[in-house]
Amino acid sequence: MTDYIRKRVVVTGVGAITPIGNTPAEYWEGLVSGRNGIDYITHFDASSHDCRIAGEVKNFDPHDYLERKEVKRMDRFSQFGVSAAKQALADANLVINELNAEQIGVIIGSGVGGIKVLEDQQTVYLNRGPDRCSPFMIPMMIANMAAGLTAIHTGAKGPNNCTVTACAAGSNAIGDAFRLVQGGYAQAMICGGCEAAITPLSVAGFAACKALSFRNDDPAHACRPFDRDRDGFVMGEGAGILILEELQHALSRGARIYGEIIGYAMTCDAYHMTSPVPGGEGAARAIQLALKDAGITPEQVTYINAHGTSTPANDANETKAIRTALGDHAYKIAVSSTKSMTGHLLGGSGGIEAVATVLAIANEKIPPTINLENPDTECDLDYVPHTSRAQTIEVALSNSFGFGGHNVTLVFKKY
């Protein structure tokens, strides 16, 4: 894509359903106040599990957004995605009608899709036989359904897709949507990620591969990115959605603009199924390529919303990647992991973290990394420990890295 045909793309709406708030306003207040969203699992009896903690969404009622019949035909991950998309459209004051429907699209990523439905229907199959499985099992389970259902419930007839790149899925969705608007293939895109994987089998599987924290005696402090005592991530759930809009289209209708998205890059480690390449080489390239795509130098970066999972491998390697990509300037910027409050939403994490990043730019405040009590010597950057920080942010990055070696960096700037 040559520079002269690139359109400018801005963020005009946000939606968020998270373990620390079920609207963008609640989520933002939770972030800047350092609210902990992690506690003991209530979705199922986890007493026999090695990990018994998670960042559950509290007090969410899908009937606030959907009819009762529709709720029954959706897995929780789709309920989150469609509901957050409706929030974001309302926030953007963007009405989809027959005149613009074909120019508005949807890309919503998910790491595992409707795993709860799959588990429930497996039980039905084993106990009651194959002819008792629900006819809605497949459309409730498949990961693309949050994107499909969002289009159905909003009327968006433009480009529609689903990214399934593990924990990078939400950021890939936003980046791919950015490219479509930038290239003139859509006037606006509903994009982000959603996940609802706090289920017996899912938690058991992540625990079996030693990815989760087993700090069951202290859930509030279990997620501790960049801390020397971190022992794994804490699973979260929810959805984060952005409305990306071509600048002139947004201006023509008087839209409020949170910020501008100016760069996107993705790379692969090509190294290991679950572990990042030592030294963070793939992540560093994603950051460098995203800056190049944006036409930004390292010295212009103010803030990074880190992937920051609280796993031993990620946090040290992400720190090295930031140092490699930004050089000495890495020590002059703020880096924080909002997962310390929400837990890790897997495919939904890039969505809520992009929302956090654009709200940080718009509100000129950097969310903290909570629970950072004893910094790891390998993690030597400014992680904004404990409390939020008032600061003007000109350029911010949002990093997401996923199993399989997927690396994504998004670049946002003040409009």
Image (tube, helix red, strand yellow):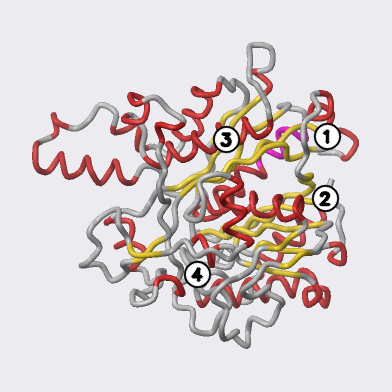
The residue under label 2 is 414
The answer to whether mark 1 and mark 4 are in CB contact below 8 A is no
Crowd tier of the residue under label 3, counting other residues whose Cα lies within 10 Å: few below 14, some 14–19, many 20 or above: many
Distance between the alpha carbons at the discs numbered 3 and 1: 25 Å
244 to the left or right of 386: right
Sequence-earlier tag: 1 or 2:
1
Q: Are marks 1 and 2 in contact (CB under 8 Å)?
A: no
Dot 4 or dot 3: first in sequence order is 3
Q: Residue at x 49, y 38 (%)?
A: 81
From the viewer's perspective, tell me whether residue 122 is left or right of residue 79.
left
Q: Which residue is mark 4?
A: 275
From which residue to which does the magenta span run?
Answer: 176-183
Residue under pointer 1: 7
Q: What mark, if any, has residue 87 been given in the picture? A: 3
Which quarter of the picture shows residue 33? bottom right
Pick the front one: 95 or 203: 95
Residue 60 in magenta?
no
